[in-house]
Image (cartoon, rainbow, N blue to C red):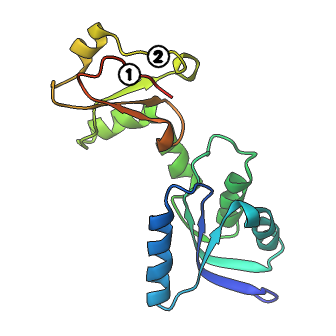
Amino acid sequence: MRGVTRVYDLVMTHKLDADDFFIHRVQQHCAEAGLNFFLVEPLWVQSFYEGLSKGLVWPRVLLNMHSEHHQPEDIYHRLVRLAAEKNVQVIDPLSRALAAFDKARLHPQLIAAGIHVPHTVIVRADKAAGFQLSEADRQSEVPSSKSPVLIGPGHGPRSARHVAGPNSPVAHCT
C-alpha cells in the first residue's frame, strides 16, 4: 500500500437518505471499536472512485449499500466493482447483490430453500404503472385473509415496493 494517502477501516456506499439512523449506528460502532469510517455520499463518490483507482485511498472493508445494481454505468456500481477488483473485502459483493436484485428469480429460490418470505406479487416493469391486484388474484394468491401482500417490481430497490393489506381495495405498484 505504498503511496496510499488514506486507509479507511470501513467504507460504506450509500446515496439514500432514508437510512440515517442505520448509518449513524454503524459510524458509532466503528468509533467505539477504534475504527475509522467513511460514508461515500454522492458528493464524494467520484473523488473516492478516482482515489481508489489511483491507489490514493484504500478501504479495508467496503459495505455495499447501493441498490441500482442493474445499472453498470452507475458510479456506485463501478466503485463496488473496482473495490472487488482491487481485492478489497466487499460486504454484499456485486455477484450476490445482483442475484438478490432479481426478485423474480430470488423468491422461488428462497422458498425452495425453506426460507419464509412474505407472499409477494412480482410485477413486470412495463406493467407496474397501472397494476392493480384483482379480486380473483386476491382470492387465489393470498394465503390468509390476515396476511399482507408485498407488491413490487421484479428488479429494483426496496423503496419501490408496496405492502397491501389483504382487504385493501386497490393495490398499486410504484
Expressed as whole percent of the image width and height from the top left, the position of residue 32 reads 44, 89
- The numbered dot on residue 144 is none
Expressed as whole percent of the image width and height from the top left, the position of residue 19 reads 49, 59
Which residue type carries mark 1?
A: Ala
The CA span between labels 2 and 1 is: 8 Å
**Dot placed on the residue nearer the N-terminal end, 2 or 1:** 2
Q: Is residue 99 above or below residue 34?
A: above
User: Is 146 on the left-hand or right-hand side of 13?
Assistant: left
Expressed as whole percent of the image width and height from the top left, the position of residue 57 reads 74, 79
User: Is 118 on the left-hand or right-hand side of 38?
Assistant: left
Where, quadrant-wise, is the N terminus in this rendering? bottom right
Which residue type carries mark 2?
A: Phe
- The part of the image, by quadrant, that contains residue 68 is top right
Residue highlighted by disc 1? 171
Tell me which residue sits at (64%, 63%) in the image. Answer: 84
Q: Is residue 11 above or below residue 119?
A: below
* Helix, strand or loop under label 2: loop
Q: Nearer the viewer, residue 167 or 8?
A: 167
